[in-house]
Image: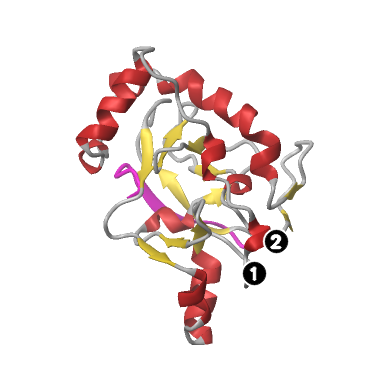
Amino acid sequence: MIHPDTELRFISNEIGYGVVATKFIPAGTITWVLDKLDREFTPLELQQMEPIYQTILDTYTFRNNKGNYILCWDNGRYVNHSFNSNCLTTAYDFEIAVRDIQPGEQLTDDYGYLNIPLPFRAADEGTRRKIVYPNDLLKYYKVWDNKIKKVFGTITKQQQPLRPLLNGELWNKIEAITAGKETMDSILTNFFDGKTMAMPTETVH
């Protein structure tokens, strides 16, 4: 589920639609949580579907560390890519704002950690990275971990509208990490080795 203080807006002809903040979202806010309405499909299930459904899943899903396809049921599936994204996923099935997000600003992910099956050239943002590769998670997980760690400790201090979607055990773990009693798991735990994938697809999220 995407953060409630967001809405779907048309961004441009090149980008299409995106998810935009309607209120200020401070760094350390949980911006998306995998919830009970999100659907998970195995590669075999996708392969057995009619082409019209395969196209939808190819377009709007990302893959978890099992190689299964996750379809977000709400506007979360419209979050666009950025090489300097303001949100990052964690090892705990939720995403976090790694810097303040202003009203009217897009919420963005880095598709490099979404286990894409094929590389693609993204819009030029003036960054050194121009292409998103399937193994970007192996290359950049330390960079992303550091960004997450800088704000992870503020999770318990921010208002968290999505907290009800986190079970008590996970929240206790978050509190333990923020208190320095446990170590934060790396984003690398989300990596799926696409070399074992039987049927590649073309687009994501």
Residue 110 appears at what percent x and percent y? 59, 43
Q: How far apart are marks 1 and 2 (CA)?
A: 8 Å
Residue 60 appears at what percent x and percent y? 49, 64
Residue 23 appears at what percent x and percent y? 35, 36
Report the residue at 22% width, 39% height from top.
167
For label 2, the crowd category at 10 Å Cα-Cα, with few meaning under 14, some 14 to 19 and many 20 or more, is some
What's drawn in magenta, residue-wise? Answer: 1-13
| Vertical arrangement, residue 37 with respect to residue 103, above or below | below
Magenta-colored stretch includes residue 18 = no
| Vertical arrangement, residue 13 with respect to residue 96, above or below | below
| Vertical arrangement, residue 108 with respect to residue 15, above or below | above
Count of numbered circles on the image: 2
Q: What is the secondary structure assignment of the residue under circle 2?
A: loop
**Amino acid at dot 1:** Pro
Image colouring: secondary structure
Magenta-colored stretch includes residue 7 = yes
Name the residue tied to disc 1: 200
The answer to whether residue 155 is left or right of residue 80 is: left
Q: Which of 131 and 116 is in front in this view?
A: 116
Q: Nearer the viewer, residue 167 or 127?
A: 167
Residue 36 appears at what percent x and percent y? 26, 56
Q: What is the secondary structure assignment of the residue under circle 1?
A: loop
**Amino acid at dot 2:** Leu
The answer to whether residue 87 is left or right of residue 24 is: right
Report the residue at 47% width, 80% height from top.
53
* Circles 1 and 2 in contact, beta carbons < 8 Å: yes
Report the residue at 28% width, 60% height from top.
37
| Vertical arrangement, residue 38 with respect to residue 29, above or below | below
Name the residue tied to disc 2: 118
